[in-house]
Amino acid sequence: MTLPSLVGCGGSPPKGATFDKPTSAATQHAVAGLDAVIDISHNVTVTDFAAVRRSNILAVIHKVTEGGDWFDPSYSQRRRQAEAAGLLWGGYHFGTRQYSGEKQAAAFLSACQPGPSTVMALDLEPNEGNPRNTMTLGQAEEFVLAVQRATGRLPLLYTHPAWANGEVYGRRRLKLDRPVVPGSLLSRCDLWLADYREHPQIPYAWSDKGWRLWQYVADETAVNFAHGSESRAVAGVGHCDRNLFAGDEAALYRFWKARAGRV
């Protein structure tokens, strides 16, 4: 059994993480979007999803699985509670190397139970706690293809710009085995970008279309501002990651409820 990850979606960025300055092949995206999406996992205390909704949050993406044999114990109950409070729902998988991408997708889908308006995502990043168990690009492609075959939809791909570009990243100075390239299967997934600078870098593979979601702060609390001087803490949860959606409220609902990630 793999241990649940405390890093990634719903966790702090790796300590010592560095980003190279964008080159001509990379672009910077204008900071504009709807600040209405949070992501959490079992290690986040939730007291009231109704309070989350009253905080102008429209959607929650929750951790579902990690690897091929770890399941977030809070996922199902929180899904019922969040949807009852009027929140849009999504689930993400933290990829590892221990199992094939196809097996990880099967575990994810069995626990996520995605409906037509459930957004799905793959978290592709270094496994700082166990670097040898970091998902490869090939496994990520297997995962995405298996999800597409089962649901008719591509998941979002959550990643950092340096990691997607095959650059050294994090305190352990790790690299993805090869970069995500334009025109590839992964580049067809909508990008869920993790970058905590004011002007995020767009990975090369998405330079033509930018991000769908941008995780701009991680582990935000009322007393510990993760980014800048203004608290972006959300009532009803102990801490959370905040994400911008590339569009307005109507576009967010269309993306989530009509053809979210459909190919």
Image (cartoon, grey):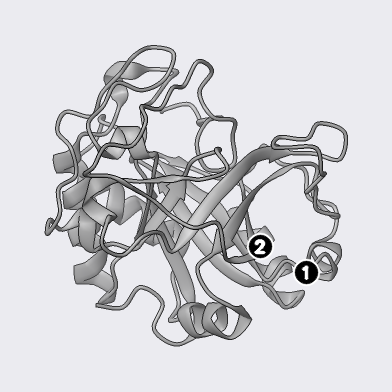
Q: Position of residue 42 (x, y in %)?
A: 64, 42
- Specify the label residue 209 is tagged with: none
Viewer-side residue, 32 vs 222: 32
Q: CA distance from mark 2 to mark 1?
A: 8 Å
Q: Where does label 1 land, which residue?
A: 56
Name the residue: 79% across, 49% down: 237
* Residue with the most extreme front position: 24
Whether residue 8 is visible:
yes
Q: Position of residue 140 (x, y in %)?
A: 23, 45
Viewer-side residue, 188 vs 117: 188
Report helix, strand or loop for mark 1: loop
Name the residue: 71% across, 35% down: 226
Q: Earlier in the sequence, mark 2 or mark 1?
A: 2
Report helix, strand or loop for mark 2: strand
Q: Where does label 2 land, which residue?
A: 35
Q: Are marks 2 and 1 in contact (CB under 8 Å)?
A: yes
Image position of 215 with respect to 228: above or below: below
Q: Position of residue 19 (x, y in %)?
A: 40, 27
Nearer the viewer's eye, disc 2 or disc 1? 2
Amino acid bearing label 1:
Asn
Quadrant of the frame with the N terminus? top left
Whether residue 102 is visible:
no
Quadrant of the frame with the C terminus? bottom left
Amino acid bearing label 2:
Asp
Q: Position of residue 252 (x, y in %)?
A: 55, 77
